[in-house]
Amino acid sequence: MGDYKIPAGATAAEITARRFGGPTQIVETLVTVDTTAIKLIGNNPRRVAWTASNRGSSDCAVSFAQDVTTGNGFILAASGGTIESYVDEDGETVSAALYAVSGSAGQTVRIVETVRV
């Protein structure tokens, strides 16, 4: 997964900096998803990973398409359903914007992003 060598005793920060060419930062946010599609995660070409977890009581649907509906998006299940994207596995999609909608208003989605700074 890269042409870098991990020195003995390296910390997670050192490994990450070698792998991505510099330090990264964790960004956590809470987003409320309602019955109208919203931007869940903005476009960010410096992002190397993200995780979205639905903390609400109703399913959400997510998509890279802004016109996502509950019938055409990927299901983000209620009460802890999670979707993730990592640059090593998912390529450029990790930097793209992600949209969400729910059939019930007021669903809380926790976002954790790893961003190259």
Image (cartoon, rainbow, N blue to C red):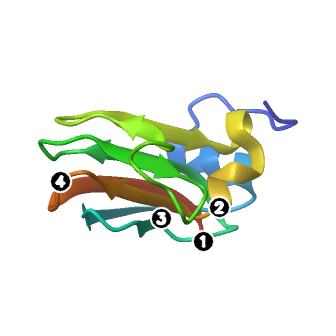
Query: How far is disc 4 from disc 2 in space, using C-alphas?
Result: 25 Å
What secondary structure is found at the residue carrying circle 2? Answer: loop
From this view, report whether residue 88 is shown above or below residue 13. Answer: above
Instruction: Name the residue tied to disc 1.
Output: 117
The amino acid beneath tag 3 is Ile
Query: How far is disc 2 from disc 1 in space, using C-alphas?
Result: 17 Å
Q: Single out the mark in the foreground, 3 or 4.
A: 4
> For residue 28, which quarter of the picture?
bottom left
Instruction: Name the residue tied to disc 2.
Output: 96
From this view, report whether residue 4 is shown above or below residue 63. Answer: above
Are discs 3 and 4 less than 8 Å apart at CB? no
Query: How far is disc 3 from disc 4 in space, using C-alphas?
Result: 20 Å
Residue 21 appears anywhere in the view:
yes
Which quarter of the figure is the N terminus placed in? top right
For label 4, count other residues whose C-alpha is less than 10 Å away and answer few (under 14), some (14-19) or many (20+): some
The amino acid beneath tag 2 is Ala
Which quarter of the figure is the C terminus placed in? bottom right
Instruction: Name the residue tied to disc 4.
Output: 104
Which sits in the foreground, 100 or 30? 100
Instruction: Name the residue tied to disc 3.
Output: 41
Q: Earlier in the sequence, mark 1 or mark 3?
A: 3
